[in-house]
Image: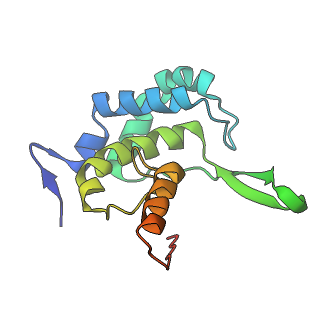
Amino acid sequence: MEVQLGQLDLLEQILSPSNLNLAYKRVKSNKGSYGIDKLSTEKMLEWLLVHKESLLYSLEKGNYKPQGIRRVEIPKEGGKVRLLGIPTVIDRVIQQSISQVLSNIYEHEFHPSSHGFRPQRGCHTALKEAKRHLNDKYHYVVDLDL
């Protein structure tokens, strides 16, 4: 089954120049670290100018393969480490372009108490909600991480 939204199908929306440009700007503004290919956000535009057509073609044909992720260990208290996986900047642009389209479709479906990785939500809004529930004399908390 193919999802149709207005005049454009999902892939057309994801690969539209306006959506891809917004995704590029968001990844660039985050100034995240490079992936396994060592391509930085500063060099991303240069890479895209050379490879844009082949990248779009592989995405349109469905044979684009994301690269592996770079593993980084973030030190935590007590000598422990948190493993972090860093995708390449190009994979992040693609992920961002997909997220922008899908968020518009599915965001309204999420429960109001869902805070993780959602626009204008996060740990601070979750803590405010938890405080509100404590003040309302609730006694149990259910925490799910899917």
Image x and y of residue 17, in percent: 30, 28
Residue 89 occupies quadrant: top right
Q: Is 78 left or right of 9, judged from the image as shown?
A: right
Image x and y of residue 135, in percent: 45, 65
Q: Is residue 106 in sight in this rendering?
A: yes
Give the residue drawn at x 53%, y 27%: 28
Give the residue drawn at x 30%, y 42%: 14
Give the residue drawn at x 68%, y 39%: 37
Give the residue drawn at x 46%, y 51%: 125
138 lies above or below 130:
below
Q: Is 103 left or right of 58, judged from the image as shown?
A: left
130 lies above or below 12:
below
**Front residue (pair 10, 128):** 128
Image x and y of residue 6, in percent: 9, 45
Image x and y of residue 110, in percent: 31, 62
Display colour scheme: rainbow
**Front residue (pair 65, 142):** 142
**Front residue (pair 127, 19):** 127
**Front residue (pair 51, 14):** 14
The residue positioned farthest toward the left in the image shown: 6
